[in-house]
Amino acid sequence: MKICILLAAGAAMGALGLAACTPTKVAETPPATAPAPSAPKLPVSLNAVMVAMVDHAAEPIWVNGYKPPTSEAGWRDLEYNAHEVAVNGKLIQLVGTGPNDAKWVANPDWIRYADAMSAAGMAALAAAKAKDVAGVNTAGDQLVESCEGCHKTFKPDLTTGGIYKDPNYPKK
Ligand code: HEC
């Protein structure tokens, strides 16, 4: 580069010339787990997603583990709930409107637990399709592990949005 050579050649500007020619440090590539800059933002908080979607779909899967569906429609419901858990595990890797959401989804441990939840959903889906009750049970255990692991690490004592599974908690 012409300018570099000129600067470097200038006796008084030697040091400056070197500095000017040093390539600027390329910004570190973000970890693969970070959401893409164009990732959509959820219109509600992750707190709301937990209650309205994650918990809502997980609960009946656990129930079906010991009380298997007795009709085709029941098995189909189980399949749908399994789909929801599998997709929710990916959905909660997006930022919602909660104050901690961005910080949470940027943490690799968060992604790990969320992916584990998604995988448990897929296991439940396979078991539902095969009408394999023991498999539903095993997938349910796998699912609990993902919830508990993440909650131990990230869940605050009081939720950021004040949204709880039990509408009467905490006692008002
Ligand atoms: C990747 C992390 C993660 C996973 C996986 C996860 N949660 Fe959560 N969950 C949280 C965090 C964090 C909060 C608190 C959100 C807030 O305060 O904004 C929460 C809040 C909740 C709440 C609302 C608070 C309450 O106690 O009533 C429920 C219900 C819930 N989660 C259920 C589940 C269930 C069921 C699963 C598994 C099927 C699960 N979560 C999996 C991180 C996770």
Image: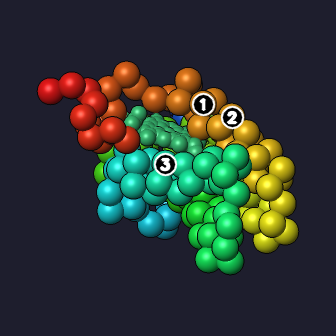
Disc 3: which residue: 55
Q: Which quadrant of the view contains residue 8? A: top right
Judge left or right: residue 31 versus residue 35.
right
Is disc 1 placed on a helix, strand or loop?
helix
Mark 1 and ligand 1: say if the CB distance to the nearest ligand atom is below 8 Å. Answer: yes
Which residue does the image show at 63% across and 47% down from the upper left? 62
Type of amino acid under label 2: Glu
Q: State how far apart marks 1 and 2 are (Cα).
A: 5 Å
Q: Nearer the viewer, residue 112 or 170?
A: 170
Q: Are marks 1 and 3 in contact (CB under 8 Å)?
A: no
Mark 3 and ligand 1: say if the CB distance to the nearest ligand atom is below 8 Å. Answer: yes
Q: Residues within 10 Å of mark 3 (few under 14, many from 20)?
A: some
Judge left or right: residue 27 versus residue 39.
right
Q: Nearer the viewer, residue 134 or 14?
A: 134
Mark 2 and ligand 1: say if the CB distance to the nearest ligand atom is below 8 Å. Answer: no
Disc 1: which residue: 148
Q: Nearer the viewer, residue 75 or 28?
A: 75
Q: Position of residue 24 (x, y in %)?
A: 60, 45
Q: Quadrant of the C terminus?
A: top left
Q: Are marks 1 and 2 in contact (CB under 8 Å)?
A: yes
Disc 2: which residue: 145
